[in-house]
Image (cartoon, coloured by chain):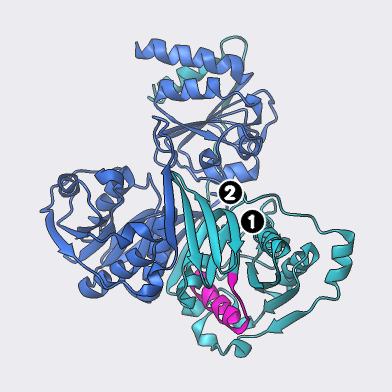
Chain colours: A cyan, B blue
């Protein structure tokens, strides 16, 4: 019986115009959002683990009202239950505060494994799994490309830049999985219908025993001083290859002193 | 001057270029102290400004994931009260530094591309949303723990004392639970490391699966080879070479995209490159919106010609 919590994030659509609000936080309201694509792999892996053995999957998110969409998508894919932590005081929370909220919520749930996607598609730092693990006093095996659960033991393959590692851990564990773990399933019609009956608990900070002073924009340990759009790249020179494209390319590189 | 702790990455003792960049950046803030797990070429560390070199020697640092290193570095921060802690923005660097920041209740910055110090106030610069925005941040609590991306500064030699000090740390049992059973080194390509390279030449769907022309051109320039997600998903090139949202973010002096359309997922990984060049058959490929120079043509004829031209010019 493996009890898995999958933490997912509702993110602004990467193909939409992403921007910041007046208080220098990511605009999560004025832009279309969805379940972070990279979190679908986490849901998929969790489902595969319980399908190969026995257990259940609870999907957890922290975010504004619209973040319920992310939970619903995971339930449609096959997760058993959902938890949505929503509280006005959370607005502007950084990765550290978010990890506190997640860790408190995870502690409130019964779990063996916590599974994350490798990174969000907005902030993209990939650091929340590590921070949650640190708060739970657990190891984190990040960027897993293959997971095998055998009783109490979890074996993980990690394809790093310089080496491929095999890692073994027992007991409670935090994992993050890459997009190399395998294609995430699409919700079936049956899955979509079934998701409507699944239980989604709504929790506030008070339910987690957290004070508003522990999270939010004003309590972050870092401060965004300014943001500015990157200056658009000035249009470059485009030539059509008429048998001399390669030579012209190198002439450009030589003028720029790369050759 | 206060100390700045710099976590050194030195596989097989050889100090990496990003570590030298960190030492250079550290000198803007205070006196660099190198922190080494295992051993590093101490002469190089001193040459690039390390006043002190703290070395840790315990098998636990290699046998387990980041837990033991994070605990050791946390104890060093408590002991030395540094002005800042600088760590490379690698997977391991981010994990160690994030745990240290949380344990020391200090502000953490991920993926800085610049770090400046003005009268004791440290300001970092990060690139977000696929490189479309630049954000400047400060740290409001604790000794800043900053992870810095490769190529964020040019390493500059500046002799430091390089005084070696062996240190030990108390490692908890909880930090020793995820054990590395085996670690197989990948075969060396002989090319520069992708995220550190000054020039990256990459290939996408337009290669049709044959990277020969891309690799040959890369080698003529002494460049690293990258690949788009389309090429990786097709099994044409290993995932560790993928540039983009779900792969590596690179910011070289020169990026040459070949047969890559330039979808947002790819741009996220390369659009902060200083100079961008593209070769693509499709003159409407979005990649051409980014380029300083573009060739509309078949990479299979353009690249070999360019490779010959580079070789001719280099003699």
Residue located 47% across and 72% down the image: A138
Chain letter of disc 2 in the image: B
The quarter of the rendered structure image containing the C terminus of chain B is top left
Residue located 48% across and 70% down the image: A131
Residue A127: tell me if it is visible: no
What span is colored magenta in the figure? Answer: A95-113
Q: Residue B299 lies in magenta, yes or no?
A: no
Neighbourhood count class around disc 1 (C-alpha, 10 Å): few under 14, some 14–19, many 20 upward: many
| Contact check, label 2 and label 1, Cβ < 8 Å | yes
Residue B214: tell me if it is visible: yes
B216 vs A206, left or right, is left
Where is mark 2, residue-wise?
Answer: B246
Snapshot quadrant of residue B14: top left
Residue A38 is labelled as 1
Image x and y of residue A246, in percent = 53, 15
Image x and y of residue B265, in percent = 62, 45
Chain letter of disc 1 in the image: A
């Amino acid at each position: 019986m493996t009890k898995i919590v999958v933490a997912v994030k509702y993110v602004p659509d990467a193909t939409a115009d992403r921007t910041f609000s007046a208080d220098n936080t990511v605009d999560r309201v004025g832009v279309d959002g969805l379940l972070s694509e990279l979190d679908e792999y986490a849901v998929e892996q969790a489902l595969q683990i319980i399908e190969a053995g026995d257990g259940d999957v609870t999907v957890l998110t922290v975010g504004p009202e619209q973040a319920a969409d992310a939970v619903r998508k995971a339930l449609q894919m096959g997760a058993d239950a959902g938890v949505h932590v929503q509280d006005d005081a959370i607005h502007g929370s950084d990765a550290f505060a978010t990890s506190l909220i997640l860790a408190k919520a995870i502690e409130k749930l019964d779990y063996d494994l916590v599974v994350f996607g490798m990174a969000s598609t907005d902030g993209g730092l990939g650091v929340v799994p590590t921070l949650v693990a640190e708060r739970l006093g657990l190891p984190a095996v990040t960027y897993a490309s293959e997971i095998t659960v055998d009783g109490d033991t979890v074996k993980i393959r990690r394809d790093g830049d310089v080496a491929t590692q095999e890692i073994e851990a027992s007991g409670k564990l935090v994992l993050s999985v890459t997009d190399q773990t395998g294609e995430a399933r699409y919700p079936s019609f049956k899955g979509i219908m079934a998701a409507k009956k699944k239980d989604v608990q709504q929790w506030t900070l008070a339910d987690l025993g957290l004070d508003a002073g522990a999270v939010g924009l004003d309590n972050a340990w870092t401060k965004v001083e300014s943001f500015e759009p990157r200056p658009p790249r000035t249009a470059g020179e485009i030539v059509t290859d008429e048998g001399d494209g390669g030579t012209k390319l190198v002439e450009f590189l030589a003028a720029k002193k790369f050759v | 001057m206060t100390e700045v702790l710099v976590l050194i990455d030195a596989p097989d003792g050889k100090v990496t270029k990003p570590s030298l960049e960190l030492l250079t950046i550290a000198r803007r803030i205070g006196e660099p102290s190198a922190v080494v797990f295992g051993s590093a070429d101490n002469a190089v560390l001193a040459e690039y400004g390390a006043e002190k070199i703290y070395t840790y020697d315990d098998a636990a640092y290699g046998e387990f994931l980041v837990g033991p290193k994070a605990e050791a570095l946390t104890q060093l921060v408590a002991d030395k009260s540094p002005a800042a802690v600088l760590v490379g923005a690698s997977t391991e660097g981010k994990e160690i530094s994030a745990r240290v920041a949380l344990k020391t209740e200090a502000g953490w910055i991920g993926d800085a591309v610049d770090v400046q110090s003005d009268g004791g106030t440290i300001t970092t610069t990060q690139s977000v949303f696929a490189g479309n925005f630049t954000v400047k941040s400060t740290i409001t609590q604790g000794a800043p723990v900053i992870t810095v991306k490769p190529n964020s500064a040019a390493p500059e030699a500046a002799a430091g004392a390089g005084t070696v000090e062996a240190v030990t740390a108390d490692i908890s049992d909880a930090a020793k639970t995820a054990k590395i059973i085996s670690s197989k080194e990948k075969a060396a390509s002989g090319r520069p490391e992708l995220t550190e390279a000054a020039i990256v030449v990459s290939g996408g769907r337009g290669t049709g699966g044959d990277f020969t022309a891309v690799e040959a051109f890369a080698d003529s320039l002494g460049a690293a080879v990258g690949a788009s997600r389309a090429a990786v998903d097709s099994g044409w090139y290993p995932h560790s070479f993928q540039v983009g949202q779900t792969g590596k973010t690179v910011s070289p002096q020169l990026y040459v995209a070949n047969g890559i359309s330039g979808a947002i997922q790819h741009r996220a990984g390369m659009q902060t490159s200083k100079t961008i060049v593209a070769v693509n058959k499709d003159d409407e490929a979005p990649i051409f919106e980014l380029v300083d120079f573009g060739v509309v043509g078949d990479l299979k004829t353009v690249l070999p010609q360019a490779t010959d031209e580079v070789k001719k010019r280099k003699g």
